[in-house]
Image (cartoon, rainbow, N blue to C red):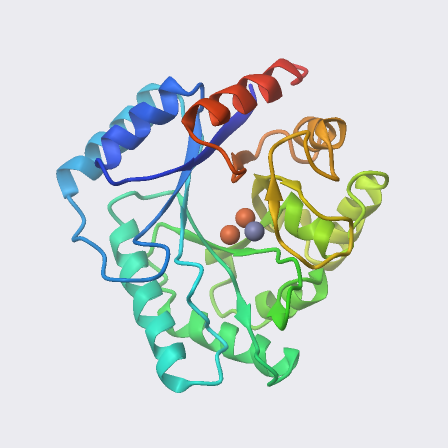
Amino acid sequence: MLNIGCHLSPSKGLLAMGKTALALGANTFQFFTRNPRGSRAKPMNAEDAAALMAFAESHAFSRFLAHAPYTLNACSASPETREFAEQTMADDLSRMEYLPGNYYNFHPGSHVGQGTEKGIQMISDLLNRILRPEQHTVVLLETMAGKGSEVGGRFEELRAILDRIVLPEKVGVCLDTCHVFDAGYDIVNHLDDVLDEFDRIIGLSRLKAVHLNDSKNQMGSRKDRHEKIGQGHIGLEALVRVSNHPLLRSLPFCLETPNETEGYAAEIALLRSHFIE
Ligand code: FE
Ligand code: FE
Ligand code: ZN
């Protein structure tokens, strides 16, 4: 069975979000841990979290993803901005302990002219300060489009971050199809080569989840504008090859396409209909 879901809002509660996922035909999902612009988070409702965990288990959901606010920058030039990212992520990870065994995805950051090396060091240093041996969440570095000074547009950059992590079993990677395509990896014509390269540089065992998105722009555009499945430059066929690929097919796939719930339900059904059991 294809493990697929979409980005959802937890605004009506965690259990309600799980029920919405199920109603859309999903068996996984992703949600922002707080307002995506990074404001204060509501305290975690332990009862609601336990209800979501039981619901996900009883409906055979795969692991799901929380997404850090995309405005955090672990490698900002400003110490205050880095400190804010650190506090927010540490707080999110302690809240994620109410949802044990799932993933916490984040954008590595933008080095804003300090250089990729410096960025890599700041990101890994931050992770090393917040990761705990006893935590039950694996933090995922998202592959980025390489827009502006983003770190993580090249597999080598993610590898360099992973190499500096003191608790490597607590950190993995989430591959975003729109981002890698925009970064110049040809997943349309050479998916096997891209996965080979991923395996050689990062190691496929570190790949824990996929963001399944089409792209409004051409390969290598470094733009990061998501498109609906089949309406962009990646196209349905290539995305179906991704979701069916023997090395990927058991991972959780999450849609982050420009859709409301009905559009997501249709894309989930479409991708399920193309999944070869
Ligand atoms: Fe993201
Ligand atoms: Fe993404
Ligand atoms: Zn994106």
Residue 253: image x %, image y %? Answer: 55, 34
* Residue that appears at 61% across and 68% down: 150
| Quarter placement of the C terminus | top right
Residue 135 at x, y = what percent?
Answer: 33, 56
Q: Residue at x 55, y 19 (%)?
A: 1
Q: Quadrant of residue 227?
A: top right
Residue nearest the viewer, comparing 158 with 108: 108
Q: Nearer the viewer, residue 169 or 151?
A: 151
Q: Position of residue 85 (x, y in %)?
A: 37, 70
Q: Nearer the viewer, residue 79 or 122?
A: 79
Q: Is residue 29 above or below residue 217?
A: above
Q: Report the number of discs.
A: 0
Would you say 83 lies left or right of 259 here? left
Q: Residue at x 30, y 58 (%)?
A: 92
Q: What residue do we see at 67% from left, 63% from top?
A: 146
Residue 174, percent across and down? 56, 49
Instruction: Report which quarter residue 130 is drawn in.
Output: bottom left
174 sits left or right of 154 in the view:
left
Q: Is residue 236 left or right of 167 when viewed as pictured?
A: right
276 relative to 258, above or below: above
